[in-house]
Amino acid sequence: MLVPDWELLSWIAAVFGLPVATWLGLRQLKVSNAVSVLAALVVLLGVLVVGYAFPRSTQPGGQDQGQGSNENPPQPQPIDQPSKPENTGPRCAVGYRETPHAPVELKPCISRTGNQLEISTEVVSTAAGEVTVWLWLYDAKAEYRSENLLHRCSLAFNAAQQTQRCVFSATPDRPGLYDVATHAELTSQADDVPRAWGEPLVEFTGTQSGYPMAWPPQ
């Protein structure tokens, strides 16, 4: 339902009503018609001057100037979604490392995939033979390794310069700064664990990538 703009109606009434009332009043006082018309015109001019000197503060319909009816409504704010751990890696040792107990060279790598750490090593043969390769997670800062996360691969090479990989994914059993550690021996001389597994951790650290990763992801 449309509402009358009373301010506009009052303005129209003032423009037309005051001059007419002035003319009628002067005529009743026996003032000549010419003088009455002139007085009415003066009143009309005065009303117009006042109207321009004091403009309306609002537009028709009660809306403030500068605020159109089609003003953009506030947009809903996006809801933050829980972030997932980003995949990182692989981070690998620079070059290949010789091993004293097997005719292979190792290049260990570590990466983060989802909620696990993936540890691996490239194994390049320097001669034919069967070798056993172990992988595990090692926290050098805390001097800690999980005995339950030791993984082994049995690999056979027919000649030198052949490449294979040993890969294992694991979730560390406690927070830490973990690197991959690896070790290789001839299968004919290998046991269930590396030969130096029982030595102090600071003395047997295996071949590492040199790029430890914090766990859990930060």
Image (cartoon, helix red, strand yellow):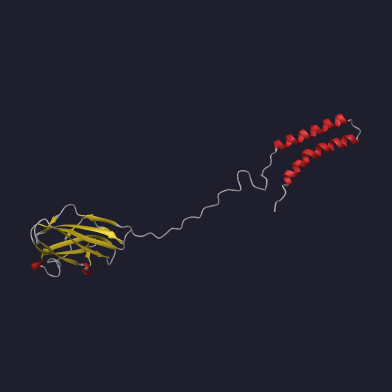
Taking the image as shown, residue 123 lies to the left or right of residue 40, namely left
Whether residue 139 is visible here, answered yes or no, is no
Q: Quadrant of residue 144?
A: bottom left
Quadrant occupied by the N terminus:
bottom right
Against 61, residue 25 (above or below) is: above
Q: Is residue 120 visible?
A: yes
Picture layout, residue 112 above or below residue 59: below
Task: Looking at this view, name the residue that lies furthest to the right.
Answer: 30
Q: Nearer the viewer, residue 137 or 75?
A: 75
Please state, as top left, top right, bottom left or bottom right, where the C terminus lies in the image.
bottom left
Q: Position of residue 108 (x, y in %)?
A: 19, 58
Q: How many marks?
A: 0
Q: Residue 168: name its quadrant.
A: bottom left
Image point 25% across, 56% down: which residue?
A: 90
Locate residue 100, reporting x and y percent.
Answer: 9, 59
Residue sitting nearer the eye, 38 or 97 = 38
In the rendered image, residue 60, in percent from the top left (x then y), is placed at 68, 45
Residue found at the far front of this picture? 158
The residue sitting at the top extreme is 34
The image quarter containing residue 116 is: bottom left
Q: Residue at x 21, y 60 (%)?
A: 120
Q: Is residue 149 left or right of residue 128?
A: right
**Which residue is found at the position 72% from the left and 37% from the top?**
51
Drawn side of residue 203 relative to residue 82, left or right: left
